[in-house]
Image (cartoon, helix red, strand yellow):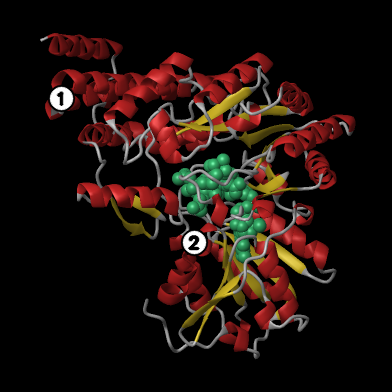
Amino acid sequence: MKLVSTFSSQAEDNNKSIEKKNVILIALHPNEFPFIGESHGISIISGYLKSKFDDINVYLYDQQLDSLDEILKAIKHYKPSILGVAVKMKTFDQMQILYERIGREIPKEQRPYIVLGNSIPHFNGETILSKYFNDVFIGLGEGEIIMNDLYNYIHKKQSFESIRNIMYIREGRIYSTKRSYLSGAEILLPDRSRTAEFYKKGGEVYIEASRGCAYCGCKICECRDFLGSKTFSKKWRPRTTYLTLLDMRNLMELGVKNITFADEDFLGFDDSGIDRAIRLAKAIISNNININFRINARVKSIYNENDTAEMRIKRELAFQALKKSGLVKIFLGLESGSLTQLKRYGKGFEFDEFKNAYQILNKLDIDYELGFILMDPLMSFTEFKENLKFIKQYNIIPKVSSIYKELRIQSGNKLYLSQVKTVEIKKKIQIVSDLDFYNQEYNIITYADDRITFINNIMKQYDNISYKIYYLFRIITQYSENSSKKDNIGQSAFFEIIGSIKNLEFDFLEELMKLIEIHGLNIMKGKELLNLFETKKRFIFASILNNKLYSKYCVLYPTINKELTDYIELSESFTQFEHTNIKKVEEQKKETMNR
Ligand code: B12
Ligand code: SF4
């Protein structure tokens, strides 16, 4: 790697005219991302700093609420000593603009120490320092740690060398200090100064009850290198029940009625995690906290085949108690209905465990959404068929978050990537590209099985212009329940809409499967099917727009309306939306298939 050699380190720059007590934290946001939600990372860092330092002033800015001009104005006004930026996935272009404007608009002596944190800097620190910005600090892992130490350093209470979780470049060499993790008790109260603004705009509000994942073993997830750890004791760290409760109480006082636990693994380690969940649920009830909440859980947290009979009962009791205390939905990482694919993903549970978990959730009448990654580049046609069969067998189309979804191989995802590399060498083909830095993904060039490449090419076209609007509906239903309560942004209309889109997608995939079985990789017939299903989809979207099914309930109404109108404008044959036309195409298709 070529390193920059002429660097004047931030750490050696002592002539800054900055306000030592002021700190600004910014969360960048991808352009035109059709969703808003509080950036919990910067809120929790701010809360931590405020509780550690009496004299500190922390100001929160978020591109979802504030323009870049407003953010720059604040930097000029407050002259902070530290500017912490959360460079979340897909925001590196925003970071470049911000950096360039700081360089242009803020005199050198007034420039704060710039710290970049969150996932892009964490996984790409060396590249950022050597190729993009050589005068920033990279915050590794949990940002509370570097921000605490850097603030102490600025106030001459700590040496530069003792700052933890930092990466920086000096005289062409990259240095990084040892990773440190917070204990659960150090997950303090977040700064909720901007929560109400997000909530009022229909944005999602997050909270934590733990950090990390007790399993950290999936080959499609890099949590073991990020907020989790490879070291057993640091993998999963529960927050204190007291602070979780206090946080919820504060949110209730702000008028927030719906929240999502950001925890990757809400229940964590076996017995202790279940006991803790029961304690938390009881405490929520006894403290009269009335907030609906959603959690992420693993299949094994609901049913574990190694459990004793006593433990099995306890698990059910925990979910009953959680439901009683406000749990309205669980996100469950199922990811596949094929045994071999599940193994490749390293999910670490058995299908029998899912079967039991599924029965328990249905019995307890707890709503759930199943994470599902149908397509991965190493998938075989047999696995594809197994997945469709599985979805049908369990009748889970409405529960699967997306029927057609390609695995995203993200930066840092070494375990899955190494499986790809092995197949690439064996088959002498290139399956994935180099890392696409802006998207933070290794793009899939081809699938190992030609039949999957064929299906995927068609599905990509099918998804192409409707992706954004589909994503919007998906995210609205993800953060709501299919209930009749009127204070819920995701009313049943949304579930009906998303249900019909998912059913259509499933039918399409099934038809593609049959086509391949009967006709092989016949491009013409594939296109005919694509046209048919495109027309059906346009019909669904047009009727949503015409009937304004969602307008009464939804704060996201203007966004939905705009996206739908754009889609309709973009789709060429809008004028052919007559239902009769669809029937005609279907009849033609039947004839073709029968020939
Ligand atoms: C909520 C969430 C979302 C929300 C975001 C809402 C919002 N406004 O932030 C939505 C649904 C929009 C979303 C979208 C996506 N997400 Co998301 N998301 C999450 C989730 C479940 C929780 C995030 C959270 O609040 N965590 C809790 C807080 C405390 O952690 P944190 O934000 O990471 O912050 C800590 C550190 O990162 C660091 N830090 C953060 N900011 C800063 C700033 C500074 C200066 C410093 C020093 C440190 C620092 O310190 C913080 C406190 O310790 C995480 C999983 C998880 N549990 O973290 C996935 C996760 C972050 N998402 C992920 C992905 C892949 C995505 C998408 C790319 C998916 C997609 N293709 O659409 C998009 C990207 C869009 C975007 N830029 O936000 C991945 C990232 C993987 C990776 N390699 O980095 C995660 C880790 C899930 C996973 N295990 O795969 N996501
Ligand atoms: S259970 Fe979730 S957080 Fe844990 S390793 Fe698997 S995907 Fe990652």
Judging depth in this view, the residue of 570 and 400 nearest the camera is 400
The answer to whether any part of residue 409 appears in the image is yes
Q: Is residue 592 left or right of residue 188?
A: left
Quarter of the picture containing the N terminus is bottom left
The answer to whether any part of residue 542 appears in the image is no
Q: Position of residue 564 (x, y in %)?
A: 41, 32
Q: Is mark 2 within 8 Å of ligand 1?
A: yes
Residue with the mark numbered 1: 520
- Please identify the quarter of the rendering in which residue 251 is found: top right
Q: Residues within 10 Å of mark 2 (few under 14, many from 20)?
A: many
The residue most toward the right is 286
Q: Position of residue 87 (x, y in %)?
A: 53, 60
> Looking at the picture, does residue 536 appear above or below residue 14?
above
Q: Earlier in the sequence, mark 2 or mark 1?
A: 2
Residue with the mark numbered 2: 123
Dot 2: what SS?
helix
Kind of residue indicated by mark 1: Gly
Q: Is residue 491 left or right of residue 381?
A: right
- Please identify the quarter of the rendering in which residue 295 is found: top right
Dot 1: what SS?
loop
> Looking at the picture, does residue 15 appear above or below residue 153?
below
Judging depth in this view, the residue of 448 and 395 nearest the camera is 448
